[in-house]
Image (tube, rainbow, N blue to C red):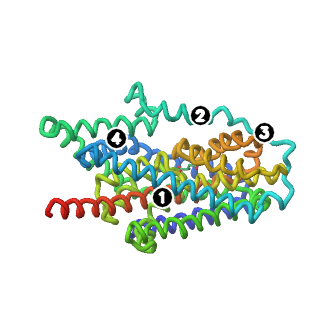
């Protein structure tokens, strides 16, 4: 609790320091940023990223093994996918509606003649993403941090652990102990969080120009409003109806993880901390959280989909292109796929946006307009991305508990 207070304080102080440096000492900012903020921020990021691959591997293997049988795995996997896809589709629909009402691209002067953006080739096609889930070399997948591939391999190992039970008990024990070591390291590393978040915030805010923000204010407001509405309308009601929990209870317990997501702008980097929070403070079973949250951090990105929806409508408005209903439906579909393909690291959502724009024939160069202010929005949308995964874990845990009670009742009859 004390640590969380320090993190909040350091976020605030970091933002303030960044702002003061940007406004009054911009010349000095560059060197302070290079020699202080960037190294301290990177050390913090590296420390948590260091744990991500081993944690995802151990916890998914153990999580799947803990589920016990393929039927349960299929049921939880199916429910997670349904939750991820439907909430993401709702998120982007909400974003498109809001952007069409507010029309952020029609007010202000946007210089579109000199825009260039060359990130197009970096967006992989959806088929490639799907085929590439299966690693040809699991060690290479771990070395390269290919999360979907690591998840796939870990899930297979988990299935084997469950099937072979007594024969491989020692291996299961070793994995359990490794998991305990990793979770202990998460606790240890979180003590560096106040320094890390201070540096990351000071660096991000210090680099943002106010003039850039002013021109883009309406776009930013639209994205932020859509993020808030999604949390209030979709997440809160889903939590209440299917999770039997109050949204206030959720945010009270989960906000420290949201702060980490906010300062790192990376769902992957937040994962160790958000899993620990959900398992220890929110009473979600380890096996469900261990399976659902890493999967969600990799493929479930409602916040990112919201940015992509608003950005697409915004770019169409700036370029004076009317989107038909058909095109908007395509935007919803491709943004759902794009957010699945987006890796949980900073800024990737913007690169995947090029896939959405291309699908509906909008100029990809439009991305250059929003790139300058994206970091700040990235922080916010990552907090939403991470919350979506946690809420999914809570709901599935609740429905599994109910399923088991029903099953016991059925067998007693
Ligand atoms: N930074 C986001 C995340 O890690 C992804 C993105 O939208 O760029 O969740």
Q: Secondary structure at mark 4?
A: helix
Q: Quadrant of the C terminus?
A: bottom left
Determine whether 167 is above or below 314 in the image: above
Residue density around tag 2, few if under 14, some if 14–19, many if 20 or more, within 10 Å:
some
- Apparent side of residue 146 relative to residue 327 in the rendered image (left or right): left
Cα distance between the residues tagged 4 and 2 = 24 Å
Q: Quadrant of the N terminus?
A: bottom left
Looking at this view, name the residue that lies furthest to the top: 136
The mark closer to the camera, 3 or 2, is 2
The mark closer to the camera, 1 or 3, is 1
Give the residue at mark 3.
116
The mark closer to the camera, 1 or 4, is 1
Q: Secondary structure at mark 1?
A: helix
Give the residue at mark 1.
388
Cα distance between the residues tagged 3 and 2 = 20 Å
For residue 57, which numbered disc appears in the image? 4
Disc nearer the start of the sequence (3/2): 3
Give the residue at mark 2.
124
**At which x and y percent is residue 169?**
15, 40
Residue density around tag 1, few if under 14, some if 14–19, many if 20 or more, within 10 Å:
many
**Residue depicted at 41% across the width and 43% down the height:** 50
Residue density around tag 4, few if under 14, some if 14–19, many if 20 or more, within 10 Å:
many
Q: Secondary structure at mark 3?
A: loop
For residue 37, which numbered disc appears in the image? none
Cα distance between the residues tagged 3 and 4 = 39 Å
Q: Nearer the viewer, residue 255 or 71?
A: 71
**Residue depicted at 84% across the width and 46% down the height:** 112
Quarter of the image holding residue 396?
Answer: bottom left
């Amino acid at each position: 609790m004390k640590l969380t207070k320090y993190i909040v304080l350091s976020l605030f102080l970091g933002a303030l320091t960044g702002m003061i440096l940007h406004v009054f000492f911009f010349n000095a900012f560059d060197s302070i940023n290079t020699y202080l903020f960037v190294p301290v921020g990177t050390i913090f990021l590296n420390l948590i990223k260091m744990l991500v691959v081993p944690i995802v591997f151990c916890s998914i293997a153990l999580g799947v093994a803990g589920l016990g049988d393929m039927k349960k795995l299929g049921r939880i996997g199916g429910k997670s996918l349904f939750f991820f896809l439907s909430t993401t589709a709702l998120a982007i629909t909400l974003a498109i509606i809001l952007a069409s009402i507010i029309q952020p691209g029609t007010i202000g002067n946007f210089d579109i003649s000199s825009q260039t953006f060359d990130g197009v080739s970096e967006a992989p096609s959806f088929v490639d993403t799907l085929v590439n889930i299966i690693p040809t070399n699991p060690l290479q997948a771990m070395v390269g941090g290919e999360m979907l591939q690591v998840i796939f391999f870990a899930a297979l190992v988990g299935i084997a652990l469950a099937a072979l039970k007594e024969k491989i008990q020692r291996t299961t024990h070793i994995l359990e102990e490794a998991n305990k070591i990793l979770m202990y390291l998460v606790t240890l590393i979180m003590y560096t969080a106040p320094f890390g978040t201070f540096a990351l915030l000071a660096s991000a805010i210090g680099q943002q120009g106010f003039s850039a923000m002013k021109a883009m204010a309406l776009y930013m407001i639209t994205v932020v409003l859509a993020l808030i509405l999604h949390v209030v309308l979709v997440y809160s009601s889903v939590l209440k109806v299917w999770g039997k929990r109050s949204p206030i209870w959720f945010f009270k317990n989960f906000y420290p993880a949201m702060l980490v997501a906010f300062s790192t702008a990376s769902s992957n980097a937040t994962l160790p901390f958000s899993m620990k929070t959900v398992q220890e403070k929110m009473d979600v079973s380890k096996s469900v959280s261990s399976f659902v949250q890493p999967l969600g951090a990799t493929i479930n990105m409602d916040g990112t989909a919201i940015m992509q929806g608003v950005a697409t409508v915004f770019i169409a408005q700036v370029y004076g292109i009317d989107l038909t209903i058909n095109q908007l439906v395509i935007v919803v579909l491709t943004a759902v796929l794009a957010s699945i393909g987006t890796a949980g690291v900073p800024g990737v959502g913007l690169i995947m946006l090029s896939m959405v724009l291309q699908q509906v024939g909008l100029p990809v160069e439009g991305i250059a307009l929003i790139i300058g202010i994206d970091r700040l929005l990235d922080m916010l949308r990552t907090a939403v991305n991470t919350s979506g995964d946690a809420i999914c874990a809570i709901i599935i845990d609740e429905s599994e508990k109910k399923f088991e009670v029903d099953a016991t009742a059925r067998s007693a009859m």
